Image: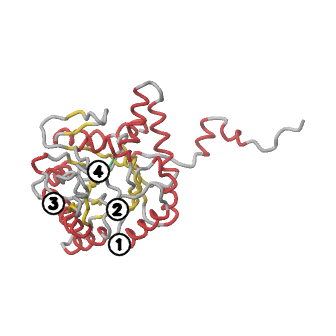
């Protein structure tokens, strides 16, 4: 019998050959580290997210120091807000003396080179646990108002820009918010502050653990009237096109792992940088399986991240950012 002329396995014979042929490389600077912060003096463990912490302001600065050491260049901040500061209108979201503005200034002072990303949405501040302002319908049902919410989001984004955020990241999925935020920031002279738009954000069961970390779950109803239907792909392209047209600097897909096709399609359809968010539920699937001894943790983490990058993400938000970066170093 004649030897096989074509053998793809030749290129996989050694680590050196595999290295030459590798198409996708994950670097620490591709990673954005999402961090939870609260007002307390102690760092807290999070029952719904083992392995993550709700940092005190001081603990947060230490943790960012370690991440920077590992080569991480960007952090995304999420506040756990005291119940007493929550309200139907989410006014605490634009309090210049609030937790997030204070933390942003402190980070910029200590680590001026770190890119700070702040979330624009009302859920941590809303007594209803929704991303926008709720108005009850005739049968008491939850309705999230679009345009009134956008006004509040503009104030929140401005407050974050004043504190020194590099990128404001609207995760609320209201219509028209990117244009409104851009106009507000420009009108106040913040032409350098960027917008990382959560463009294709799906109504996902994989956010559950995050809502536990922030104690921000909706008191009633779900988020399906503003977040996208997991069954839809064309609609994601529409949302991405709108956000780009409204002036977004970067687009995001969220969650990541179950939406690799969406990352790929948005990557093909835009020239803007594309981010993907490996969300809390994706993090926990790996953590929990590894804790049970069912998965090799480090390898599973690396594979999950490289797959997201291969699908077309330029940058990845991941709760594994610090440890993944440390291993890449
Ligand atoms: C809320 C927000 C959510 C996440 C980031 N911003 C939750 C939600 O929309 O309910 C989820 C992140 C994660 O699960 O890790 N604006």
Mark 2: is the Cβ under 8 angstroms from ligand 1? no
- Closer to the chain start, of discs 2 and 3, is 3
Mark 3 vs 1: CB contact within 8 A: no
> Which of the pair 256/192 is nearer the observer?
256
Residue at 53%, 48% in the rendered image: 24
Image position, residue 55 (x, y; %): 21, 39
- Closer to the chain start, of discs 2 and 4, is 4
Residue at 18%, 54% in the rendered image: 126
> Residue beneath label 2, please?
197
Q: Is residue 232 left or right of residue 171?
A: right
Image position, residue 329 (x, y; %): 41, 38
> Residue beneath label 1, please?
246
Disc 2/disc 4 C-alpha distance (Å)? 13 Å
Disc 1/disc 4 C-alpha distance (Å)? 22 Å
SS under mark 1: loop
Residue at 35%, 49% in the rendered image: 32
SS under mark 2: strand
- Closer to the chain start, of discs 4 and 3, is 4
| Residue 89: numbered disc | 3
Q: In front of the other: label 2 or label 4?
A: 2
| Residue 213: numbered disc | none
Mark 1 vs 2: CB contact within 8 A: yes
Q: Is residue 7 left or right of residue 290?
A: right
Image position, residue 17 (x, y; %): 63, 40
Q: Is residue 16 left or right of residue 95?
A: right
> Residue beneath label 4, please?
76
């Amino acid at each position: 019998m004649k030897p096989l002329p074509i053998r793809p396995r030749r290129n996989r014979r050694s680590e050196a050959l595999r290295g030459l042929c590798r198409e996708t490389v994950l670097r620490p600077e591709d990673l954005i580290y999402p961090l939870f912060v609260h007002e307390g003096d102690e760092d807290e463990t999070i029952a719904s997210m083992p392995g993550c912490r709700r940092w005190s302001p001081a603990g947060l600065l230490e943790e960012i120091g370690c991440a920077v050491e590992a080569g991480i260049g960007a952090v995304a901040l999420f506040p756990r807000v005291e119940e007493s500061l929550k309200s139907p209108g989410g006014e605490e979201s634009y309090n210049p003396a609030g937790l997030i503005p204070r933390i942003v200034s402190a980070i910029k002072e200590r680590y001026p080179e770190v890119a700070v990303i702040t979330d624009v949405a009302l859920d941590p501040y809303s007594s209803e646990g929704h991303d926008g302002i709720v108005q009850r319908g005739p049968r008491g049902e939850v309705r999230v108002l679009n345009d009134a919410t956008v006004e509040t989001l503009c104030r929140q984004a401005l407050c974050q820009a004043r504190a020194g955020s590099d990128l404001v990241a609207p995760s609320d999925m209201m219509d028209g918010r990117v244009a409104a935020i851009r106009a507000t920031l420009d009108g106040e002279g913040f032409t350098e502050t960027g917008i990382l738009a959560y463009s294709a954000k799906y109504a996902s069961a994989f956010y559950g653990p995050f809502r536990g970390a922030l104690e921000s779950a909706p008191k009633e109803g779900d988020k399906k009237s503003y977040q996208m239907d997991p069954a839809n792909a064309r609609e994601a392209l529409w949302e991405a096109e709108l956000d780009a047209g409204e002036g977004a600097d970067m687009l995001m897909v969220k969650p990541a792992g179950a939406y690799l096709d969406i990352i790929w399609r948005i990557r093909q359809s835009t020239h803007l940088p594309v981010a993907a968010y490996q969300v809390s539920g994706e993090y926990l699937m790996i953590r929990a399986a590894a804790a049970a001894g069912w998965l090799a943790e480090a390898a599973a983490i690396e594979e999950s991240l490289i797959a997201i990058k291969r699908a077309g993400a330029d940058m990845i938000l991941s709760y594994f950012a610090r440890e993944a970066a440390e291993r890449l170093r």
